[in-house]
Each structure stands twice: as structure tokens, then as C-alpha cells.
Amino acid sequence: MVFVFLVSLLSSIVVMQASSHKGFFLDDHDSSKPQRFHHAPTPRAGGLAIFLASLAVVWLIPWGWAFMLASSLAFASGIIEDFKGTLTPKVRLFIQLSAALAGVWLVDALILDIGIDWILPWGLGLVFTLFAVVGAINSINIIDGFNGLASGVAMMVLFSLALAAHSVGDGEILCLSLSVLAATLGFFVLNFPKGKIFLGDGGAYFLGFVIVEIAIMLSQKHEEISPWFVLGVMIYPVYEVLFSVYRRRLVRGLSALHPDGIHLHSLLFKRKARNNPKTSILVWMLTAPFIFLPLGYKGNEKWLILTILLFVVGYNWLYHALVNFKVRQKRRAKKRA
């Protein structure tokens, strides 16, 4: 794992140097994207370093080549955007669906058991798997707003999944989880707190794919691990996607793919933290209990569902409290006047 970490770290440094000299893979600070909170052109190909370092798994586990082949499609759907910025949403979706299908075909990452004694027919399970994988691929990208935020959450999720794999004696998934965690850590030390390099779409999509594939394989191979456990561990990025779709499509009447700057982490930055790395730390503190507590009852579906509901209620309460924060401030100012 030390080797994987060093490969990622050195690759990140090479990407940073190459980007600064050649001007490619740079995230333009003048861009009008609403989710941007930095003020200087920064390399956004940290995912390239993570992907290259993660290739070590092909020598560590028997199906490593198959897994990395499937994950390379998810990675490609983002790294092309990082390099050229010309990939249309439909083409990106097609590539991500191809990655999900490759996961089913190459490593048997198919969701049939969804818990509570429900087993899906193969065809319905395939459709559900495609929906879940594509959603998870995008979930890490949607929380990638501040230095270390997405990679920090991803590492916590990977560590939780690694502990679950260890508890059921699955050495291969344990090795995969820790390898990608080490690769992410090599990037993380340059991304947090100074933001010298960014994860980029390629890195976010790759991590999202790896996490959901590990989650599927764990929950489908081991009866001791409920599918609700892996949903609970991933609930923050997953619910951020669902809530964003609801907010954009149903509340604001916009396309579900339309970017905006009012995610939970964005509101925490504007209303509370007012500081890039502090925002990430605050989000980690809020989400860590929901990532690690389910390890204590990973087979108890009632407790797992209760934990998920608790997160949803807490998220909604906090989100609306932050949205109304400025309104309350204005009312108080008027009363004082």
C-alpha cells in the first residue's frame, strides 16, 4: 500500500508540473461554473494519478485486470472532459452505462438481493444495477466542491467497506478497497488543504465507480452484509444526487443535469465556514458517523434503515436551516432598524 501511495503522490506531482508548463488539464478560475470556489488556474487531473496508482490491483487480485478494465470506462467519461471539456451529457451517460454493464459482465457486480427478503428478477436487477451504478458514479463528482471534500469522503467510505470486507474474510475486496484508498491518499496530501491539484471529473467518476462496485460485490456475495449497509455507508453522496435532482427538476423546473451552486457543502461555506478547507472538515464531521456506525450492525436492516432515515431528516433540516439563514438575518436587521 505504501508503494501505491507513493506512485499516486509522484504521479500527482508530475501532473502538476506538466499542467503548469503545458497548460493542459487546468481548471480555469474565470469559468462561470457556479460550483467553483477557487481563484487560480489549477490542474484538475488528480484522478489520473489515482487511476495509475490503482493499477497495482491487477497484480494483487485475480480479477484485477477485469475490474480495472471496467473502471477505465468510468474514468474515461471524466478524464476526456478534464482534458478537452467537450463531452456532451448524452455521450458521458452512454460511457458510464457501458462501465456499469462491463462491471456486470466482467466481475459479476449485479444487484439482485435488495434486502428485506426481496430478490429481483435478473432483467429488473440489471436495470436497477445500471441506475444505481450511474448514480453512484456521479455522486462523488457532485460533492467535489472544496479541497479534500470528495476525496476525504471517498477514503472514509473505502475504509468502512474495507473493514466490512475484513469482517467477513473477503481478502480480495479488502485489498482492492485499501489499494484505492492508498492511491487516493497520495493525491489527497496535495489537494488538502492548499488545493494544489484537483480531483477532476475523471477522478470523481473513477472513485464513484470503484466504491459502488465494491459495495455491490460485498452485499451480493456475503449474507452477513445487508444491501442497506452499503447504502447507509454511501448515503451522503447518494442523497446529495437525489436531492439535487429533486431541487433542480421539481422545485426549480430546470434540467436535472443543470449545475448550480446550492449544494449542502456550498451553503455551509456561504453561511458558516467561509473557508475552503474548513468547509470540508465540517462536512467530514457531519457525515463520518453515518459512514462508520453502520459497521456495528451491518446485517441488521431495521437499524440500517433507521440510520438512513435519520440522515435524510437531518440533511433536510440542515439544508433548509441554511437556506433560511440569510432570510432570518434580514428580518433581524429590519427589526433593529
Image (cartoon, grey):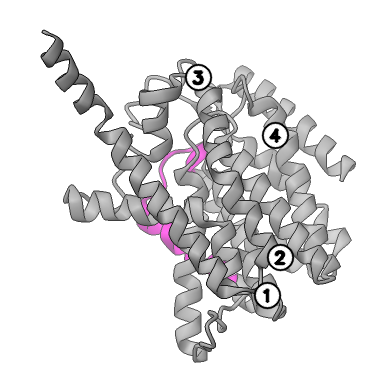
Q: Amino acid at mark 3?
A: Pro
Q: What is the spatial separation of the Cα atoms under label 2 and label 4, in whole angstroms?
A: 21 Å
Extreme residue in the top direction: 337
Q: Amino acid at mark 4?
A: Phe
Which mark sits nearer the N-terminus, 3 or 1?
A: 3
Residue at 87% of width from left, 46% of height from top? 1
**Is 82 positioned to the left or the right of 165 in the image?**
left
Residue at 51% of width from left, 56% of height from top? 235
Q: Which residue is mark 4?
A: 187
Which mark sits nearer the N-terminus, 2 or 4?
A: 2
Query: Residue 299, how many percent across, how many down?
Result: 66, 74
Please tell me whether mark 1 sits on a helix, a strand or a loop: helix
Callout 1–callout 2 Cβ contact below 8 Å: yes
Which mark sits nearer the N-terminus, 3 or 2?
A: 3
Region in magenta: 81-102
In the rendered structure, find residue 38 and report the number of the disc placed on it: none
In the rendered structure, find residue 41 and report the number of the disc placed on it: 3
Residue at 78% of width from left, 44% of height from top? 182
**Is 90 positioned to the left or the right of 247 in the image?**
right
Front residue of 126/291: it is 291
Q: Which residue is mark 1?
A: 106
Query: Residue 90, how many percent across, how many down?
Result: 36, 58
Callout 3–callout 1 Cβ contact below 8 Å: no
Q: Amino acid at mark 2?
A: Phe
Q: What is the spatial separation of the Cα atoms under label 3 and label 1, in whole angstroms?
A: 39 Å
Asked where in the image residue 239 lies, by quadrant, the reply is bottom left
Residue 55 visible to an observer of this rendering:
no
Please tell me whether mark 4 sits on a helix, a strand or a loop: helix
**Is 268 positioned to the left or the right of 301 in the image?**
left
- Crowding at dot 4, Cα within 10 Å, few <14 / some 14-19 / many 20+, comes out as many
Q: Nearer the viewer, mark 3 or mark 4?
A: 4
